[in-house]
Image (cartoon, rainbow, N blue to C red):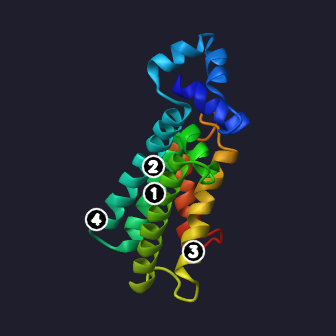
Amino acid sequence: MLRAAVALFIRKGYDATSIDDIAKSLNVTKSAVYHHVSSKEQLLAEVLDEALDELDSAVDAATRGTGPASERLRDVVRRSVEVLVAHQSAVTLLLRVHGNSDTEVAALRRRRRIDRALASLVNEAVEEGALRADLDPDVLSRLLFGMVNSLVEWYRPNGEISADQLASTVAALAFDGLVRA
């Protein structure tokens, strides 16, 4: 039921999707859907929590970890790609919420907390001399994770590139660049 709801939320938009739409996509009655969930918003909350819990875990591990901030940052970039691949629909939906409901507002608050933690990690890496100091760390953080987030638009898990290859490529591009040394 959750997967059907997510597919409809992504295709039609959360606001334009009804419980009846979800029921029809599953070939069940609305009452059958309501037997399992109390509302459409409960479905949204479960999906957003799926994405946010995994991302929170990756960021918390990096920010609480030991060792150079640059290595922890590289690890969280790799892990973020892996989370996106494993939970692509949930992350796609997360990236499309706008704060139109209490659930969306709560999800956006969690995203902002994650963004602040990542920006702090970028700042640490700049301070330790591992990243360029001539570029704004907040901009670096947004660009770095913007690149990761853009994967929802084109990456297909059943394609030629594995999640591990993708994570390695993103990390290499972000930290080693395009120019051959």
Secondary structure found at label 3: helix
Q: Is residue 67 left or right of residue 84?
A: left
Secondary structure found at label 4: loop
Lower position in the chain sequence, tag 4 or tag 1: 4
In this view of the protein, can residue 28 be seen by the observer?
A: yes
> Which amino acid type corresponds to the residue marked 2 in the rendered image?
Leu
Q: Which mark is residue 65?
A: 4
Q: Is residue 55 left or right of residue 138?
A: left
Nearer to the camera, 33 or 136: 33
> Residue 140: which quarter of the image?
bottom right
Residue for point 59% across, 33% down: 6
> Residue 93: which quarter of the image?
top right
> Which amino acid type corresponds to the residue marked 3 in the rendered image?
Leu
Residue hosting label 2: 52
> Which amino acid type corresponds to the residue marked 4 in the rendered image?
Gly
Lower position in the chain sequence, tag 4 or tag 2: 2
Q: Is residue 106 left or right of residue 15?
A: left
Q: Nearer the viewer, mark 3 or mark 1?
A: 1
> Which amino acid type corresponds to the residue marked 1 in the rendered image?
Arg
Residue hosting label 3: 140
Distance Cα–Cα, label 4 vs label 2: 19 Å
Residue hosting label 1: 110
Lower position in the chain sequence, tag 4 or tag 3: 4
Is disc 1 surrounded by few (<14), some (14 to 19) or many (20+) residues within 10 Å?
A: some
Distance Cα–Cα, label 4 vs label 3: 21 Å
Is disc 4 surrounded by few (<14), some (14 to 19) or many (20+) residues within 10 Å?
A: few
Nearer to the camera, 138 or 19: 19
Distance Cα–Cα, label 1 vs label 2: 7 Å
Distance Cα–Cα, label 2 vs label 3: 21 Å
Work out which quarter of the rendered image holds the C terminus and state it.
bottom right
